[in-house]
Amino acid sequence: MLVSKMVDRPILEFTLMNTPLLRSSNEAERLAALRDLNILDTAPETQFDAICRTAQVLFGMPIALVSLLDEDRQWFKARCGLSHDATSRDVAFCNHTIQADEVLIVEDARDDARFKSNPLVTGEPGIRFYAGAPLILRSGIRVGSLCIIDTEPRRFSSEQGRQLRDLAEVVTANLRVYQDRTEHRRVAATLADTDDALRDARSRYASLADALPQMVWTVSPEDRVTAYRNASFRAYYGEADGSRGRAHSRNHPGDVDRMSSAWEAAVSGKQAFELEGRLRRHDGDYRWHRIVMIPLKRSGEVIEWLGTALDIDHIIAAQTALKATGDLLRLAQEAAEAGIWEWDMRDDVVRLSSMSARMHNLPVPVGQDAMEIPLADWKVQVHPDDLPKVWDEVKRAIADRTTYSCEFRIANPAVPAEPRWMQSFGRMLDDAAGEPVRCVGLQIDITDRKVSEARIAHVASHDNLTDLPNRVVFHATLERSLADLGNGQAALLCLDLDRFKTVNDTLGHHAGDRLLRVVADRLRDSVGNEGVIARLGGDEFAIILPGVGLETAQALARTVIDAIGQPIHLGSQVVTIGASIGIALAPEHGLEVDLLHRHADLALYRAKGAGRNSSQVYTKGMDEALEDRNKLEFDMHLAHRKAEFRLYYQPVVALTDGQVRGFEALMRWPHPIRGMVSPTEFIPIAEETGLVVPLGTWALEEACRFAASWPIQARIAVNVSAVQFQQPGLEAAVANALAVSGLAANRLELEITESLMIQDGDAVIACLHRLRSLGVRIALDDFGTGYSSLSYLRRFPFDKIKIDRSFVREIDDPDAQAIVRAVVSIGERLGTAITAEGVETEDQLALVTQTGCTEVQGFLFGKPMTPEQALAFMREQTPRKAA
C-alpha cells in the first residue's frame, strides 16, 4: 500500500510478518555517517541520475536505483524505471546488500528463501532478478547500494558484477564530494572571521584547529614562514618538520610554478586565494589538497596569512575514475555509433544528435551538433510495418512510466530494398505534477547485427555445401505440413543417388562436392515452388510436397530421375549417376513425421533393390522386406563365423584349341534355411557392412589352396572388390595366400572392375604394380559397363580384359560387334588377352570368335561348379573348339 512517511513524496511500504530487520553491527555509526552527508530527501541531481541511467542501459535492465538505507526506510537518491522514491527498509533487498562489501546477486528471487515471500516479489513490481553493489563510504560504513532490477530471472556474470561495482565506486565518489563539500564549508565558516578575534582567542582556536581533519597553519607576511601548524599539519609533514619551513619546498615539482604564482598574486593584492595542488607527505608521497589562504588584516594591513589544506586525493581519484568512465561511455557511444535523441511530448518535437540525424538520413545544419524535426516527420522515417509496434511500445512506457526498447527499420536511400535496422532505448520523464513531458534515449544502428543474425540463422538451417534446407528445417517443415493437412494430402519423397559413392571414392571428395551442388541445382529446377527440398546428409535428399497426391508425386519423381540422370561435367571427367526415390503419402502412410519418413525410406530401399534409377511407393510389405534384409545381414555374419560360404568355379576356355586356361572363383552361400542365396543379394550387403574384406581374404586363401591341387597348370581368377582394394592389407593377403598354398604366382589372376581405375591417383597404379611385382596377373573385369576410359589402359598394362556379358548378349548387333572388335584391336596392340563373358549359345560363340576374342567363359562351356565337379571337369572334359 502507499503511505506518507517522513516526507511528502510517497513511500512504497510493506511489512514482512515475524521477520527481524537486518541491522549492521555498527548501525549507529553507519546512520551517523549517512546523516552527516545531509543528502537524504534532497532534490534529484544530474550526476546521480546519469549513473542510474548508465547502469540501466549498460545491463539492459528496466529498473536501476541509487538506494540509501535510513533507520527504517529505503530512500532513492536516483531511480530509473520506478515511480516510488522510497520503500520500507524491512522489505528492501538493499538491506541485505549493505551487510557485506561484495555485490549481492539474486538471479531468481522466487527460488531464494530470503526473498520468495517478499511482497516486492509476490506483488508489484514483481522482482525476479536483483544485483546490488554496496556504497562504501569508508571501511565498514556502507550507507546504501547501486542496484539493478528485472521482472524476469537473469544470469549475471562475474565480469558484469565487476562493472556494477565500478559504477558503485563512482556513486561513492560523488557521495564523498558531498561529504567534503559540507565539511569544507563548515571549516571555512569557522575560520572566516579570524581578524582581531584570532589573536584574542588563539588558544581556544588552536584547540579547535587541532581537532580538525584539515591541515591549518599561519604564515607571517614578513619572512613568509609557517608560524603555527595544527596537529593534522604536524602529522602530515612529520614531527621533525620545523614550524618555520618554507611552504614551497613541500610542493610537487609539477605544481611549484603555478602555486608560487598564485601566492605572489595573493600577497601583492592582499586577497585570499584557493587552488588545488599536490603536497609532499613526510614519507615522500604526494597527495592532492584543496588549499585556501586567507589574509588576516588590521587597519587594512595584512598581519598574518591563515592557511587550510583539505586532503582531496580520494576525490581527485574518484573524479579521474569518473572522467575515465565518462570517456569510456563516450568512446563506447562513438564506437557503437549510438545516436542521442529527445522527444518533447508537449510540442511533439524530436531533437536528434548529429549521429542520430545521420542514421535517419537527415542533414545537420553546419556548425550545429543537433537538429529538431516534428514528430510526424520522424514517424515517416520508420518502416510502415514496424511503426505500429514501435508506437505500442511507446504507449506502454508512457502508461507504465518506465523505459522502452524496440527495434525497427528505416529507409536506406542508398539501397531502398535493404532498409537499415535500428535499436532504440527510451526513458519517460515526468514534470513536477507527475505527468510525462519528455522521453530521452539513444539508438544504435544494428543493421550489421541483423545481417549477421540472418546469416547465422541461414547457416543453422541450411546445408553449407548445397545451400538447401537441412535436416532440422526438413523435420520442422514436414511437421508443420502434417499439422496443417486437414482433409488434404501431402507427399514425401526420399532420394538417394546411385553410384555417388563410386564417384566420391574414385574422383575424390572435391568432385563429389561439385556433383552434389549440381544435383541440388537440378532438384531446384525440377521442383520449383511446388515443394521444399532438403539435404539430409551425404547423398540423401528429401522433397516435401504439400497438397500433392500419388500421381503428381510419381510424375515429379520421374522428372527428378530424368534430370539427375543427365551427364555431369566434373572438370575433365564426365560422369553419369542415377537416383532412387521412395514415396510416402499422408495421411495414407502416416501422420507423424518419423513414421512417414521411415516409410519413405523403406520405399527408397525397395527402389534401390529394384535396379536403382527408379521410384517406389511405400506398401505395407516393405516393413517385412527390411526385416528380411536385416535378418540376412545377421545371418551373413553368423555364416562367416561358421565358415558356411563356399567357392564355386567356372571354366575359362581358349578359343584356339578349346583347352581350359583357368577357372574363375565365384562365392556362393548355401543358407541352411533359405537355400542357395544369390550373390546379387549378399555381395552388396557385404560391401556395405565391410564384411567383404574378411570374406575376400578367405576367398584368396581358399582359391589358391584349391588351385595348387589341380592336375593341370591352369590359372585361378579371384575377384577383388573396390572396398577390399581400398582397405590396407590387400597386398599382404595376396602374398600370404600364395605362400601358404605354394601356388605359383603366375597362376593367380586378380580381377578388378573399371570403377576402381577411375581414381586418377598414383596410389592405385602403384598398388597394381606392387601386386604385379609379386608375379600375379591383373585382369580388367566387366569392361564397358562403368566409366570406361582408354587412358588407364595406357597407364597400366593389364594381362587380360574381360568384355562384359551385356555386349555378348547383343553380339548379333553390328554396333556391339564394332565395340568388341575395337577392344580386341586395342588388346592385340597392347599384348592383352581378351575374354568374352556370358557365352551361352553356339551363335554367340561363333560371333565372338569372329571378332577376335582369345578366350570365352559362359554356360556353353560350363556353369559354376563345386570343387569336386571342377576337378572332374578338368579330368574328363573334351577340348572344344569354335565352329
Image (cartoon, rainbow, N blue to C red):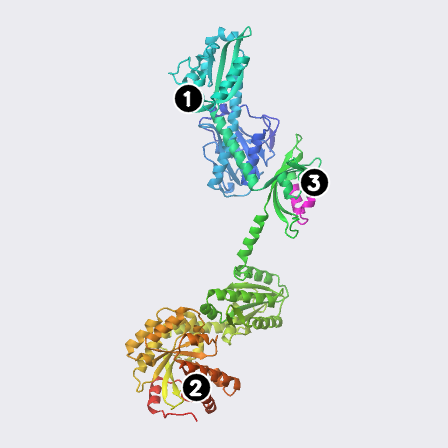
* Disc 3 crowd, CA 10 A, few/some/many (<14, 14-19, 20+): some
Residue at the spot x=41%, y=19% of the render?
237
Q: Which residue is mark 3?
A: 375
Q: Which residue is mark 1?
A: 281
Residue found farthest to the front: 829
Residues marked 3 and 2 touching at CB (< 8 Å): no
Q: Which mark is nearer the camera, 1 or 3?
A: 1
* Disc 1 crowd, CA 10 A, few/some/many (<14, 14-19, 20+): some
Instruction: Locate the C terminus and report the quarter of the image it occupies.
Output: bottom left
Observer-nearest of 872 and 77 = 872
Place of residue 497 in the rendered image (x, y in percent of width and height, measured from the top left): 51, 70
Q: Is residue 599 left or right of residue 782?
A: right
In this view, 151 is above or below 267: below
Distance (Cα) linking label 1 and label 2: 113 Å
- Residue type at mark 2? Cys
* Disc 2 crowd, CA 10 A, few/some/many (<14, 14-19, 20+): many
The stretch of residues the image draws in magenta is 379-396
Q: Which residue is mark 2?
A: 853
Q: Circle 3 sits in a helix, a strand or a loop, which is it?
A: helix
Distance (Cα) linking label 1 and label 3: 60 Å
- Residue type at mark 3? Leu
Distance (Cα) linking label 3 and label 2: 94 Å
Mark 1 vs mark 3: which is more N-terminal?
A: 1
